[in-house]
Structures are given as C-alpha cells and as structure tokens.
Image: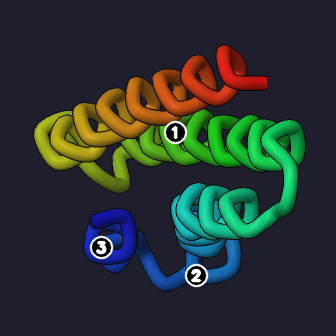
C-alpha cells in the first residue's frame, strides 16, 4: 500500500520522503521475520520493538506527506487504519511473548 501511495509523490522526493517511507514500511515486516528466526524470546522481542519503531516512522511519514500536500487525508486514511491494526497485533504478540519469558 505504501509503495502505491508513495508512487504519487513528486519525482524530486524520490531520494527523500519516498525512499524513507518505503524503507520504514518494509522494515516492519523484515524485523518481524528476522526476530522470529532468532533463537530466544528476548531477541524476538527486541526485533518486535524495532518493528514498532518502524511502524511509528511510517505513520509519521504519512502525516508529513499529508501536511506537505503530497497526498490527502482521504488517501492516507486506509494506511493509518492499517497501521493501527498492525500496531495492535505487534503489541499483542509482544504481550504474549513477555508472559512466556
């Protein structure tokens, strides 16, 4: 979703906001996957924390893109809703892992 949205950004943002928001969005899934392959629960939790940080970055970049007039609130609304859902899932997974640790 972020790739499709950021494709609308002006070409002068290619190495700026476009690149940053895409890296942050990809980093969420990448850190979950990397953490899941670690041997210990504490390591997994650490990577889930990093994924949460990347999620916050992505949300911040969406807000910034809106404020800069690159996209509308209507365009970012589904992304923000999905980010909220992903945040809930990450928090639930972290809570579950902490209770087992």
* Residue holding disc 3: 8
Which residue is found at the position 36% from the left and 55% from the top? 70
* Residue holding disc 1: 64
Q: Is residue 33 visible?
A: yes
Mark 3 or mark 1, which is nearer the start of the sequence? 3
Circles 1, 3 touching at the beta carbon (< 8 Å)? no
Is disc 1 surrounded by few (<14), some (14 to 19) or many (20+) residues within 10 Å? some
Q: CA distance from mark 1 to mark 2?
A: 15 Å
58 relative to 9 in the view: left or right: right
23 relative to 10 in the view: left or right: right
Residue 16 position within the rendered picture, expressed as x and y whole percent measured from the top left: 68, 69
Q: How is the image coloured?
A: rainbow
Q: In the figure, residue 1 lies in which quadrant? A: bottom left
Mark 2 or mark 1, which is nearer the start of the sequence? 2
Nearest to the observer: residue 46 or residue 73: 46
Looking at the rendered image, the quarter that the C terminus falls into is top right
* Residue holding disc 2: 14
Q: CA distance from mark 1 to mark 3?
A: 14 Å
Is disc 3 surrounded by few (<14), some (14 to 19) or many (20+) residues within 10 Å? few
Nearest to the observer: residue 74 or residue 56: 56
Q: Is residue 15 above or below residue 81?
A: below
Label 2 SS: loop
Q: Is residue 30 above or below residue 93?
A: below
Residue 67 position within the rendered picture, expressed as x and y whole percent measured from the top left: 43, 34
Which residue is found at the position 17% from the left and 42% from the top? 78
Q: CA distance from mark 2 to mark 3?
A: 10 Å
Label 3 SS: loop
Q: Is residue 82 above or below residue 81?
A: below
Residue 62 position within the rendered picture, expressed as x and y whole percent measured from the top left: 44, 44
């Amino acid at each position: 979703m972020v790739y499709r949205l950021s494709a609308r950004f002006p070409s002068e943002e290619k190495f700026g906001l476009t690149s940053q928001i895409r890296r942050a969005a990809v980093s969420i899934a990448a850190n979950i996957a990397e953490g899941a392959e670690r041997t210990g629960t504490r390591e997994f939790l650490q990577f889930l924390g990093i994924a949460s940080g990347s999620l916050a970055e992505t949300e911040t970049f969406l807000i910034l893109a809106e404020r800069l007039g690159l996209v509308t609130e209507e365009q970012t609304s589904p992304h923000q809703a999905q980010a909220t859902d992903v945040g809930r899932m990450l928090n639930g997974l972290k809570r579950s892992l902490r209770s087992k640790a």
